[in-house]
């Protein structure tokens, strides 16, 4: 619960606990008004509170109504699509490639987020990820470091490498976008622009989005 507004959450949980306690007394009226009898419902209340916390961290946090006053980050689960603009220079053409079609699959829980970026030539897997949230500075970002694994057929010109990606999260009503920069251990940088595509977590780059721009150039030679 690193990013949770703890103060509000504690007050809400306290309110829920009071409701559970009073409901218990209504359903099971005390036969004798002793301190011990008044304390007996606490075990049940704690159990119900535990269930509420479990349901919150499993599903309830995704509710749009809770963003951003209680849960400061949006639900990014699903597949995003867009384009990469890179400064990488193709040794054969001595030029930068055209925009590269890409998808980003995000699997997010309340406590964890993992990202897999896919193009027609490589898959990149996050191994460290998290949110950067500074409300006073109007900063809401998703950042992660990744291991990029190219297809065997392109490893001669695109070796495996590590990199870091930072996305600004743009959440305007029904339109969700990710816009950010990356840099890699092979001294390349670039920009990635994405928009939310579908709730499904795709496990393969869809061919209908088109070939990698470098692959296309090599076929034309």
Image (cartoon, rainbow, N blue to C red):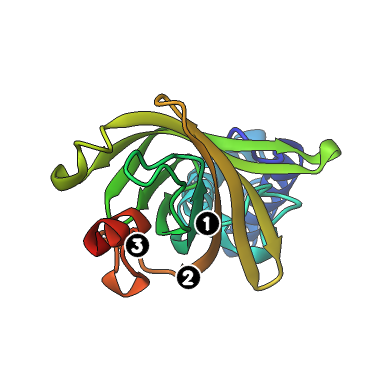
- Look at mark 2 in the image and give the residue it sits on: 197
Q: Earlier in the sequence, mark 1 or mark 2?
A: 1
At mark 2, the secondary structure is: strand
Of residues 42 and 117, the one nearer the viewer is 117
Relative height, residue 6 to residue 206 (above, below): above
| Circles 1, 3 touching at the beta carbon (< 8 Å) | no
| Circles 2, 3 touching at the beta carbon (< 8 Å) | no
At mark 3, the secondary structure is: loop
Tell me the distance, in whole angstroms, between the alpha carbons under discs 1 and 2.
11 Å
Of residues 166 and 38, the one nearer the viewer is 166
Q: Quadrant of residue 207?
A: bottom left
Q: Residue at image x 60%, y 32%?
A: 2
Q: Residue at image x 24%, y 59%?
A: 221
- Look at mark 1 in the image and give the residue it sits on: 76
Relative height, residue 92 to residue 28 (above, below): above
Question: In this orientation, does residue 154 appear?
Answer: yes
Which label lies toward us, 2 or 3?
A: 2
- Look at mark 3 in the image and give the residue it sits on: 201
* Residue 195, percent from left and from top: 55, 65
Crowd class of label 3 (few under 14; some 14 to 19; many from 20; radius 10 Å) = some
Q: Is residue 27 left or right of residue 210?
A: right
Tell me the distance, in whole angstroms, between the alpha carbons under discs 2 and 3.
10 Å
């Amino acid at each position: 619960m690193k990013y949770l507004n703890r103060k509000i959450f504690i007050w809400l949980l306290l309110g829920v606990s009071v409701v559970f306690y009073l409901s218990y007394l209504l359903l099971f009226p005390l036969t004798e008004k002793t301190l011990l009898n008044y304390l007996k419902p606490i075990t049940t209340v704690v159990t119900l509170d535990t269930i509420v916390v479990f349901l919150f961290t499993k599903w309830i946090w995704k509710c749009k109504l809770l963003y951003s006053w209680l849960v400061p980050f949006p639900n990014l689960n699903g597949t995003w699509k867009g384009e990469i603009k890179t400064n990488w220079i193709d040794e054969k053409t001595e030029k930068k490639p055209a925009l590269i079609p890409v998808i980003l699959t995000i699997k997010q829980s309340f406590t964890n987020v993992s990202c897999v970026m896919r193009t027609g030539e490589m898959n990149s897997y996050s191994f460290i990820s998290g949110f950067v949230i500074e409300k006073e500075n109007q900063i809401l970002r998703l950042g992660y470091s990744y291991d990029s694994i190219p297809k065997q057929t392109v490893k001669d010109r695109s070796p495996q490498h590590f990199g870091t990606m930072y996305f600004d999260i743009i959440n305007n009503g029904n339109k969700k976008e990710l816009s950010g920069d990356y840099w890699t251990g092979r001294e390349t940088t670039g920009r990635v622009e994405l928009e939310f595509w579908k709730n499904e977590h795709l496990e393969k780059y869809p061919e209908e989005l088109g070939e990698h721009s470098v692959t296309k150039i090599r076929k034309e030679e």
